Image (spheres, grey):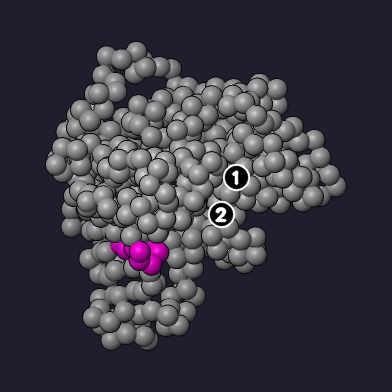
């Protein structure tokens, strides 16, 4: 920050920050816990040995995992070696699709596992993949990722990375001990506008960053119709039992990378959180299901909308909202505000001090819509220039899914650091359990654990790929 001696500030506050971070994790671990004596290597900036061919196993091929399977099978340098799912029809459907896609039968020998809850463990033992992609219900993310790393595979996990702070510490330590990647697959970081704004922030277009806004506003009550299998069958109880910001990472991930959080410049410090009353899910269940239906037997405790405020080490703020219940249009906010301008989403718009050259006269008007073509031409992220058109054709949330998977495979094959490290996945996911605790305590501040144990200060910001 231009008007702040950042290094001096961090030096003076680092001990306080570490103390706060350790304090917030005491219910899970104390500093005397033997895991703090583990032998491992810090994973910030870690690059694994090159893999000429990435042998991939996938756990969970429902709505999300089946898309990953199809796209991974389409990327050069991959071999789908195994698929595991509870349901035989899901597992065979994805295996057959991958075989169809494979050039010259590249994916012809796919081992299929289904039926029992623990078949994925047998898969890891028998197939020994290089990388495991996990797209299951939330409670299985951490145990599957940890076991995959222990069995010698890199782990790629759907959001959130884990449910509890203790699980997040276990994931971080296991990654360090095994020297295996564990990346939470935050696909939104690969959206065109998110990449554009990252590039603009890196080039100092909006000056020193002060504030961000992130959200996941997505009305998903219809998922409650998935009652035996599918997302709604296991997510609905989460909404009923837990009161907090349960799904923060889609909005937060990009904003955190704009700010270089846990990457050399700044880090997460504390959080406060508040929820509205819990009304919408209960009313929806009463309207759409019989009185004796299982959804009408739940005690809905989770607020319809949660607002959390994060304070960073440098004093920046981030508002994070979550609402999957209210009838309103989709939004991730995606706002980042600096000393000389603001970049915002939904709709995409830009305001700069002195105006956007050739478009607006001053910062009192947004440049948006067709006016933004000049912005895209000038600041389009190099990764999007290189892969964007292919990604749009391949699909997956407008191409962001494909671009994420493409980059994962590219990094593994080239022996390069991933775009998201294990600590970022932990910090972004930590908002959920911290928010639940804050809400339960009337909005009291909660300190973030520092999953890097102070080493974030030596971690390079995510590079703008040329």
Seen in the image, is 42 located left or right of residue 84? left
Residue at image position (58%, 49%) is: 63
Residue 377 position (above or below residue 90): below
Relative image position of residue 363 (x, y in whole percent) = 25, 78
Between 84 and 334, the one nearer to me in the picture: 84
User: Which residue position holds label 2?
Assistant: 401
Relative image position of residue 429 (x, y in whole percent) = 37, 41
Relative image position of residue 238 (x, y in whole percent) = 37, 40
What's the mark number on residue 392? none
Residue 64 part of the magenta segment = no
Observer-side mark, 1 or 2, equals 1
Residue at image position (49%, 68%) is: 380
Marks 1 & 2, CB-CB < 8 Å contact: no
Q: Quadrant of residue 206?
A: bottom left
Q: Which residues are magenta?
A: 327-336
User: Which residue position holds label 1?
Assistant: 62
Q: Secondary structure at mark 1?
A: loop
Q: Secondary structure at mark 2?
A: helix
């Amino acid at each position: 920050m231009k008007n702040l001696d950042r290094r001096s500030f961090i030096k003076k506050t680092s001990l306080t920050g570490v103390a706060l971070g350790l304090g917030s994790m005491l219910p899970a671990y104390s500093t005397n816990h033997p895991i703090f004596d583990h032998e491992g290597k810090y994973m910030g900036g870690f690059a694994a040995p090159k893999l000429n061919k990435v042998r991939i196993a996938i756990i969970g091929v429902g709505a999300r995992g089946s898309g990953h399977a199809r796209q991974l099978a389409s990327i050069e340098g991959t071999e789908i070696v195994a698929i595991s799912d509870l349901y035989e029809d899901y597992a065979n459907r994805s295996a057959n699709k991958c075989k169809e896609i494979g050039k010259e039968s590249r994916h012809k020998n796919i081992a299929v596992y289904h039926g029992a809850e623990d078949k994925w463990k047998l898969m890891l033992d028998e197939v020994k993949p290089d990388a495991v992609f996990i797209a299951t219900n939330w409670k299985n993310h951490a145990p599957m990722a940890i076991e995959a790393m222990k069995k010698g595979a890199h782990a790629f996990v759907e959001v959130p990375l884990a449910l509890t702070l203790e699980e997040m510490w276990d994931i971080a330590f296991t990654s360090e001990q095994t020297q295996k990647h564990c990346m939470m697959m935050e696909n939104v970081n690969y959206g065109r506008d998110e990449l554009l704004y990252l590039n603009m922030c890196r080039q100092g277009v909006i000056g020193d960053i002060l504030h961000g806004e992130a959200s996941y506003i997505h009305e998903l009550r219809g998922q409650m119709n998935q009652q035996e299998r599918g997302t709604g069958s296991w997510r609905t109880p989460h909404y009923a039992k837990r009161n907090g910001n349960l799904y923060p990472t889609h909005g937060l991930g990009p904003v955190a990378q704009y700010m270089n959080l846990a990457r050399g410049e700044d880090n997460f410090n504390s959080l406060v959180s508040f929820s509205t009353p819990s009304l919408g899910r209960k009313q929806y269940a009463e309207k759409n299901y019989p009185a004796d239906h299982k959804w009408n037997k739940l005690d809905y405790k989770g607020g319809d909308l949660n607002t959390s405020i994060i304070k960073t080490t440098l004093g920046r703020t981030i508002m994070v909202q979550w609402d999957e219940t209210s009838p309103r249009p989709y939004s991730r906010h995606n706002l980042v505000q600096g000393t000389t301008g603001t970049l915002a989403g939904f709709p995409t718009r830009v305001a700069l001090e002195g105006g956007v050259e050739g478009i607006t006269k001053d910062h009192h008007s947004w440049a948006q819509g067709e006016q933004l073509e000049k912005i895209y031409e000038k600041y389009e992220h190099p990764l999007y220039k290189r892969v964007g058109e292919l990604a749009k054709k391949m699909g997956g949330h407008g191409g962001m899914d494909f671009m994420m998977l493409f980059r994962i495979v590219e990094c593994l094959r080239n022996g390069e650091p991933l775009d998201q490290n294990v600590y970022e996945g932990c910090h972004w996911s930590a908002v959920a359990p911290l928010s639940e605790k804050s809400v339960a305590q009337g909005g009291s501040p909660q300190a973030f654990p520092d999953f890097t144990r102070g080493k974030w200060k030596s971690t390079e910001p995510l590079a703008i790929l040329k």
